[in-house]
Image (tube, grey):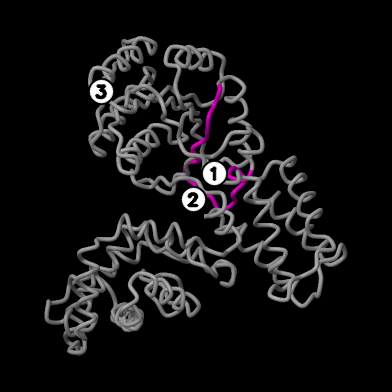
Amino acid sequence: MFDNLTERFSSTFRKLSGKSTLTENNISEALREVRRTLLEADVALPVVKEFIERVTLRAVGQEVSKSLSPGQAFIKIVQAELEQLMGSSNEELDLKAVPPAIVLMAGLQGAGKTTSVAKLALWLKNHSKKSVMVVSADVYRPAAIKQLETLARDVEVDFFPSAVEQLPQQIVRDAVAEAKRKFVDVLIVDTAGRLAIDDKMMDEIRQLHQILNPVETLFVVDAMTGQDAANTAKAFNDALPLTGVILTKADGDARGGAALSVRHVTGKPIKFIGMGEKTDALEAFYPDRIASRILGMGDMLSLIEDAEKKVDKQQAEKLARKIKRGKGFDLEDFKGQLQQMQNMGGIGSIVDKLPGMGALPPGAAAMVDDSQFKRMEVIINSMTMRERVNPDILNGSRKRRITQGSGTQIQDLNRLLKQHKQMQKVMKKMKGGGMANLMRGMGGLQGRGGFPGAGGNFPRFK
């Protein structure tokens, strides 16, 4: 996420090393580079101008603490201003209302609005322990109603049926009545999107807003549209009293223009950020954590929260007990860890949140390839249980049988075995230290190119 920003910022900060103070002369070049970086990231020009002015005001003439290098001092200023730009803290949904609390979703077609309805429903169900009902008022696209019905079934929330023959206004009235009858905590209303802003769409959604009087009106916007996302959000904000923004497809956005522009342009906070296609790939938006990720300093809080939510604790405890008894870490355990990492969003998501990403060579983060995990699992699955438990018995004939069964090459298997050996060393660091030591071990591997599919000596299957 925002890889281009991370690489360019890191390069800029390194140029300030060796200076004793931050002066107008030695930061002018750095500021020019920051300005160029933000413009190339498709950040809106007024946002860039104000950001540079604020950083300049704070940085020029500042004495550098003995515990900080000028580069670090400059990073500290830039991080504080990035947080200020995106909102000083996470702003939660305000659901204080007589049930059902109504959340109205607005946005253009293709922004991921219907998927975001399901993601938000699941998030409210799991994090806020709310009962949720969803309804589609998009009568112009029959597939949208069916899609929401399928997603509602997947995330196990109530779905209120609607049909293209109905009026959107009647659909929402009926949905509210049903939600009240069922004592549902939250009703999320999906509205029709268009390929562009038009008067008819705006009139309809204004009418729905008037009927529903929602506690939250969220604008769903595709992060990959850059500053256009901020401009579209402003147009909706002028027509509707928006309360917040959901930024979708941020996992595929290497630039970051939308994330850095939306708050400034609309005056409304980003409340959630979509980090993938799965229904659980929605995160509360924390400006301080995102700023830290952009500057290559990682986001350990989010990583640990992911581990708490998505790691199979029973399996983890079983493995910890096994290692503590000196039983070692075999290939069956390794396969389990690959599956656990995929549950946490894949190695790309984990790497993105680890500190020190800014120190990696340019383009290294982009080399992470989650598709390697499946292939690694196929190789392990082609082994007998005896071979998985004791990989040292793998001789030439056994290796040929495994690679033929998995459709891979001998060198692929050898790289997997080498990766397993390095993971064994990480697991030894877990002894008595739990997740914290595991994260530190992973951070150590990072510096040596030690993640699967991240280049170096690790799998690069054809």
Callout 2–callout 1 Cβ contact below 8 Å? yes
Task: State the residue in front, 374 or 53.
Answer: 53
Q: Name which of mark 3 and mark 2 comes first in the sequence.
A: 3
**Numbered disc 1: secondary structure:** helix
* Alpha-carbon span between mark 3 and mark 1: 38 Å
> Looking at the picture, which amino acid does disc 2 mark?
Gly
Residue at position x 70%, y 55% in the image: 37
Give the residue at mark 2.
Answer: 252
> Looking at the picture, which amino acid does disc 3 mark?
Phe
Residues packed near mark 2 inside 10 Å, few (<14), some (14 to 19) or many (20 plus): some
> Looking at the picture, which amino acid does disc 1 mark?
Met
Give the residue at mark 3.
Answer: 183
Q: Quadrant of residue 363?
A: bottom right
Q: Please tell me whether residue 250 is drawn above or below residue 329 in the rendered image.
A: above
Q: Please tell me whether residue 295 is drawn above or below residue 104 in the rendered image.
A: below
Q: Which residues are magenta?
A: 241-260
Whether the magenta-drawn stretch holds residue 258 is answered as yes
Instruction: State which mark lies toward you, 3 or 2.
Output: 3
Give the residue at mark 1.
Answer: 224
Q: Name which of mark 2 and mark 1 comes first in the sequence.
A: 1
